[in-house]
Amino acid sequence: MSEVTIVHRSAPAGLEEVVSGLWFVAGPAPTPYERILPSPEIALVVPLTTHPYRVHTGSGWRVLGGSFVAGLRQQAAMSSNGPSLGNVGAIIRPDALRAIALDPVSLAGGVRDVAGFAEVEALGAGVDGDAAMDALTRVLRDRLIEAWRPDAVVRAAIVQLAADPQPRLSDVARMQGVSPPALVARFRAATGVTPKAYADLLRLHGLLDRLTVAALSNTSTDGGTAARIAWSDLAVEAGYYDQSHLTRAFHRFVGLTPTAYFDLVRGRGPDAVRFIPEEEAPDD
């Protein structure tokens, strides 16, 4: 069986304020399903295969009509892979959907269809990664609203939130020279979520990074590695109040306990860090 091809590309020239990178994946699906974890960045995905792309976001399966956006959200989604993978996509900066004529407010909180990428969809599953990413770059440049600029307050707040795993909204607002209500309104308009919701996503991914390092640095199969993690220390390092807070938040976002996730990454390797292969579908 041929292997899955995964190609990454840095942000195209002229789009650096809008996307942080492009990606392409093609090949046989390793498992029937995949758990897609919430992210502090937004995924624009253009399917290249002919079989319908199905997604489960907690309220049953839904068939997507073509290209879609996985907006900023608080819950993992499950996708049905079909027999093969074939997607090209862009990682959109959290405050930049409006730059390509997409509404972050309506797209936040779920996985939703978007129109305007038919040229890329028509390439089909046989296209190579470079051609697919070149085509997506052309469409993104054509969609770019030249007058768009990131909200300087929101973008600075994003940087500040990334530097502090337990931010106080009043402190973030004060540093940006605005009131807390004004910050919330501007942040929601630009990203679709509140600063607190975004900080929660950043904290989750800081924890994922720490768990990944621990999992991949110890490949023991004796079943005891997870128990040797100092969960209480890890909770504090990642910005959680205590181990109980960490466990509750992790399960809410990911649908797994931290220990179960740790064991999956240890067994599956780095490709399973934010896209977890699953053998069984969730209950409808």
Image (spheres, helix red, strand yellow):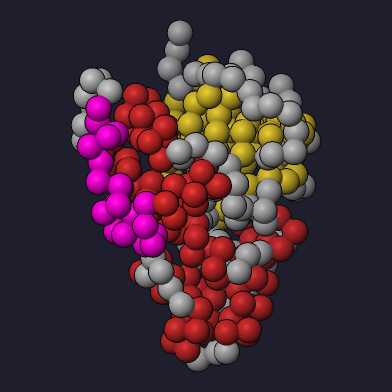
Magenta-colored stretch includes residue 120: no
Image-based side of 220 in relation to 3, left or right: left
Image-based side of 225 in relation to 204, left or right: left
Provide the major secondary structure of the magenta segment: helix
Residue at 54% across, 19% down: 279
Residue at 45% across, 38% down: 257
Residue at 75% across, 59% down: 106
Image-based side of 112 in relation to 132, left or right: right
Name above or below for residue 94 compared with residue 9: below
Position in image of residue 132 (x %, y %): 56, 36
Name above or below for residue 104 compared with residue 167: above
Position in image of residue 269 (x %, y %): 34, 29
Residue at 25% across, 46% down: 230
Does the rendering let one see residue 156? no
Image-based side of 121 in relation to 171, left or right: right
Q: Which of the pair 159/138 is nearer the observer? A: 159
Position in image of residue 18 (x %, y %): 54, 62
Q: Which of the pair 170/95 is nearer the observer? A: 170
Q: Quadrant of the C terminus?
A: top right
Position in image of residue 66 (x %, y %): 74, 36
Q: Which of the pair 103/137 is nearer the observer? A: 103
Magenta-colored stretch includes residue 235: yes
Task: Pick out the residue farthest to the front.
Answer: 244
The residues colored magenta run 224-243
